[in-house]
Amino acid sequence: MRQIDSRVRYLVKRVEELQIIDYSPQQEGKVFFGAWIELENEAGEIVQYRIVGKDELDTKLGYITIDSPMARALIGKQVDDEVVVPTPLGPKEWYINKIQYKAFEDLQS
């Protein structure tokens, strides 16, 4: 019961701090909060991520937090930019193929 009460208190505090970030046309073509990004590495591996807040993190959906090393490296970049992301195994290079502010699958329907 204590764990539930603690979690409820935490969530109530988080709700008070939450902000809705609306899309702005000025963001078009660059990576900012809320963007869907398609990346490719030199091996041809393609991944898709969306930059979200820490409360929305869901790696199964491809959501990464704004505080992650990948998101930090991507912020402000454009299509065809090269991004170097620090990892425990050393820096990894990625190339930005697409930037969208709607989910990739939403655009295909």
Image (cartoon, rainbow, N blue to C red):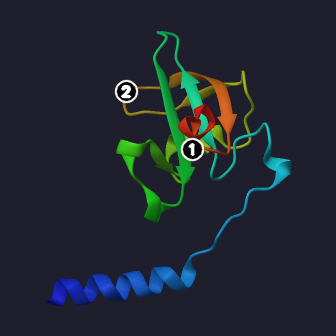
Q: Residues within 10 Å of mark 2 (few under 14, many from 20)?
A: few
Instruction: Name the residue located 42 percent from the left edge and 87 percent from the top edge.
Output: 12
Above or below, 22 relative to 108: below
Left or right of residue 69, residue 20 in this image: right
Disc 1, SS: helix
In the rendered picture of this protein, how many numbered marks are placed on residues? 2
Q: Estimate the x, y position of residue 72 in percent, counting from the top left.
A: 60, 45
| Distance CA(mark 2)–CA(mark 1) | 18 Å
Left or right of residue 25, residue 79 in this image: left
- Mark closer to the chain start, 2 or 1: 1
Which amino acid, by three-letter code, is at mark 2? Answer: Leu
Q: Estimate the x, y position of residue 63 in percent, counting from the top left.
A: 47, 47
Q: Estimate the x, y position of residue 90 in percent, counting from the top left.
A: 43, 26
**Residue tagged by mark 2?**
89
* Residue 3 image label: none
Front tag of 2 and 1:
1
Q: Which quadrant: the C terminus?
A: top right
Which amino acid, by three-letter code, is at mark 1? Answer: Ala
Instruction: Name the residue located 46 percent from the left edge and 86 percent from the top edge.
Output: 13
Q: Estimate the x, y position of residue 19 in percent, counting from the top left.
A: 62, 74
Instruction: Name the residue located 70 percent from the left edge and 41 percent from the top edge.
Output: 31
Above or below, 49 relative to 67: above
Disc 2, SS: loop
Q: Which quadrant: the N terminus?
A: bottom left
**Residue tagged by mark 1?**
71
Q: Quadrant of residue 23?
A: bottom right
